[in-house]
Amino acid sequence: MTREEAVKMADSKWYELKTAEEIVKFQLYEERLCMPFSLFHKAIEEVLGRPVYTHEFACVKNLQKEFENLITKN
């Protein structure tokens, strides 16, 4: 996704109609942020069921693995 596409998507407020899991399922795998970070942060904490510290976003692969393990258990 280009920067312009990410901005356009954020401007559409697509996330307002989505569950926390739907937000994480999309945004966690998208390189560019397509929504306010604070809302993504809140959604991932809700889905993972724990506090997620901002430094953890630097190693997104770890968050992806944790999310995938959670999804396969459910």
Image (spheres, grey):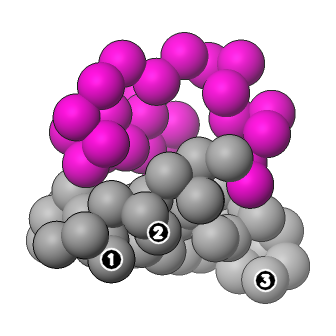
**Is residue 13 in sight in this rendering?**
no
Q: 26 or 72: nearer the eye?
A: 72
Image coordinates for residue 3, horizontal then vertical, percent: 83, 68
Q: Secondary structure at mark 3?
A: loop
Check disc 1: other Cα within 10 Å, few if <14, some if 14-19, many if 20+.
few
Q: 54 or 38: nearer the eye?
A: 54
In-image side of 15 versus 16 (left or right): right
If the image is split into quadrants, where does the N terminus sit?
Answer: bottom right
Task: Looking at the image, tell me whether mark 3 or mark 2 is earlier in sequence order.
Answer: 3
Tag 2 residue? 68
Check disc 3: other Cα within 10 Å, few if <14, some if 14-19, many if 20+.
few
Q: Secondary structure at mark 1?
A: helix
Check if mark 1's residue and mark 3's residue have beta carbons within 8 Å.
no
Q: Main secondary structure of the magenta part?
A: helix
Q: Residue at x 71, y 80 (%)?
A: 5
Quote the CA–CA distance across marks 1 and 3: 27 Å
Quote the CA–CA distance across marks 2 and 1: 6 Å
Check disc 2: other Cα within 10 Å, few if <14, some if 14-19, many if 20+.
few
Q: Quadrant of residue 22?
A: bottom left
Which amino acid does the dot numbered 2 rest on?
Answer: Glu
Q: Secondary structure at mark 2?
A: helix
Tag 1 residue? 72
Check if mark 2's residue and mark 1's residue have beta carbons within 8 Å.
yes
Image coordinates for residue 10, horizontal then vertical, percent: 50, 63
**Region in magenta:** 34-61
Q: Identify the mark at residue 1; answer none if there is no mark.
A: 3
Which amino acid does the dot numbered 3 rest on?
Answer: Met
Task: Looking at the image, tell me whether mark 1 or mark 3 is earlier in sequence order.
Answer: 3
Q: Quadrant of residue 56?
A: top right
**Is residue 64 in sight in this rendering?**
yes
